[in-house]
Amino acid sequence: MKILLVGANGTIGRAVRQALSRHQVLAAGRDSGELRVDMSQPDSIRALFERTGNVDAIVSAAGLLHLGPLAEMTPEQFRIGLDSKLMGQVNLALIGQHFLNAGGSITLTSGMGNEIPLRHGSNACAVNAAIEGFARGAAVELAAGLRINAVCPSVLQESWEPLQNYFPGFEAVPAARVARAYQRSVEGVETGQVFKVW
């Protein structure tokens, strides 16, 4: 398979790249990778697909969120998650669907904050819930044979140190375990699913 992986140099992205290493993985990122893309800019996404041509799978392991107390949050801070993680991935799916080969798939990334409220996590909660809703809704409208899913990971062991205060009592999961959910989405047959890795 020819797979476009956006966010390939992040913690999850590196693990996904390893899990899918038997395929041709095209690494893309905002600031690093073989290919550069700003998911918040549709023109940047179109330029990316003009370079890659059609692919068999699109995987997004990218997107920024804002973590902070609601009482101090500004609309501009809240828009970080909307513009980056939500609309960035939606843009990638909307444009990318037209560059998928027959039987191709799209895999997006949400996060457990949409089901388990976290301190200072209202932006993450809203954005992650919207990503999962988009994946479920898009699954029934994609062209015949195309698939879309989302992976919903818990906090990663590799990211535990700086984030542990947001996740009291939670069990962190290794990135390699999270990567298997992306592999299931890419190599499997399911669509409209949210693969939780908690």
Image (tube, helix red, strand yellow):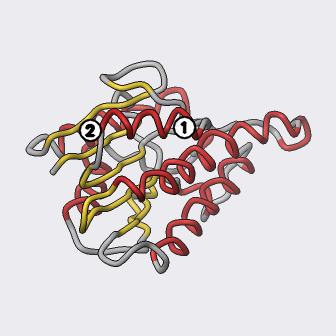
For residue 58, side relative to residue 93 (left or right): left
Residue 162 quadrant: top right
Looking at the figure, which quarter contains the C terminus? bottom left
Residue drawn at point x = 42 percent, y = 42 percent: 61
- 130 in relation to 121, above or below: below
163 or 15, which is in the foreground? 15
Residue drawn at point x = 30 percent, y = 31 percent: 27
For residue 196, side relative to residue 182 (left or right): right
- 54 in relation to 151, above or below: above
Q: Name the N-terminal-most of marks 1 and 2.
A: 2
**Residue hosting label 2:** 15
Residue 131 quadrant: bottom right
**Residue hosting label 1:** 39
x and y percentages locating residue 104 in the rendered image: 28, 62
Q: Helix or strand or loop: what does disc 1 sit on?
A: loop
Residue reaching furthest left? 22
Q: Amino acid at mark 1?
A: Met
Q: Helix or strand or loop: what does disc 2 sit on?
A: helix
Dot 2, crowdedness within 10 Å: few (<14), some or many (≥20)?
Answer: many
x and y percentages locating residue 130 in the rendered image: 64, 61
Dot 1, crowdedness within 10 Å: few (<14), some or many (≥20)?
Answer: many
Residue drawn at point x = 60 percent, y = 56 percent: 128
Q: Amino acid at mark 2?
A: Ala
Q: Which mark is residue 153?
A: none
- 79 in relation to 128, above or below: above
Residue 11 quadrant: top left
Residue drawn at point x = 78 percent, y = 41 percent: 78
